[in-house]
Image (spheres, grey):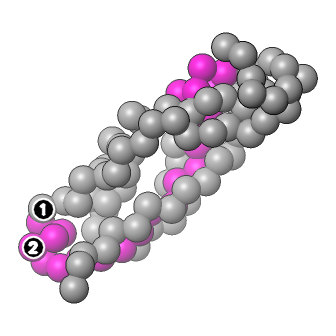
Amino acid sequence: MTPWDDNQEPDPIYRVNPVYPRDAAIARREGYVVIEFDIDEQGFVHSPDVLEYQGSKKFIRSTLDALEQWRYAPKFTDGEPVVAQNMKVQMDFKLSR
């Protein structure tokens, strides 16, 4: 893999949104999940850790299922791919009004 720049941060190249859990939607529950994770040298997500959540616990499973499908252009340091640690993302679960 060749970097666009010798020193670059991970760049998302493929993401899917989490599925809104059906029972949470029926109950009109909203919330969010904050996840911390690493991105390996090939751009795969590893070691996801839930830092915080609000709403249904099913939001966590849905977020983790989506996150495992994400792909990144990896982080590069001095032209070499390296692990990017402690990346954070918040997934919001909101219903349209």
Residue ranking furthest to the bottom: 97
Number of numbered discs on residues: 2
Q: Could you say which quadrant of the image residue 27 lies in?
A: bottom left
Res. 96 visible in picture: yes
Quick check: is 26 in the magenta stretch? yes
Q: Is residue 30 left or right of residue 23?
A: right
Q: Secondary structure at mark 2?
A: helix
> Circle 2 sits on which residue?
26
> Circle 1 sits on which residue?
22
Q: Residue at x 81, y 29 (%)?
A: 5
Separation (CA) of disc 1 from disc 2: 6 Å
Q: Position of residue 86 (x, y in %)?
A: 68, 46
Q: Residue at x 31, y 74 (%)?
A: 94
User: In the image shown, does 9 or 51 lie closer to the viewer?
Assistant: 9
| Amino acid under disc 2 | Ile
Q: Position of residue 59 (x, y in %)?
A: 31, 60
Q: Position of residue 41 (x, y in %)?
A: 66, 21
Q: Are marks 1 and 2 in contact (CB under 8 Å)?
A: yes
User: What range is drawn magenta here?
Assistant: 23-45
Q: Residue at x 36, y 73 (%)?
A: 31
- Name the disc covering residue 90, or none: none
| Amino acid under disc 1 | Arg
Q: Residue at x 16, y 70 (%)?
A: 25
Q: Position of residue 28 (x, y in %)?
A: 17, 79
Residue ranking furthest to the right: 78
Instruction: Check disc 2: other Cα within 10 Å, few if <14, some if 14-19, many if 20+.
Output: few
The N terminus is located in which quarter? Answer: top right
User: In the image shown, does 5 or 65 lie closer to the viewer?
Assistant: 5
Q: Is residue 31 above or below residue 83?
A: below
Quick check: is 82 in the magenta stretch? no
Instruction: Check disc 1: other Cα within 10 Å, few if <14, some if 14-19, many if 20+.
Output: few
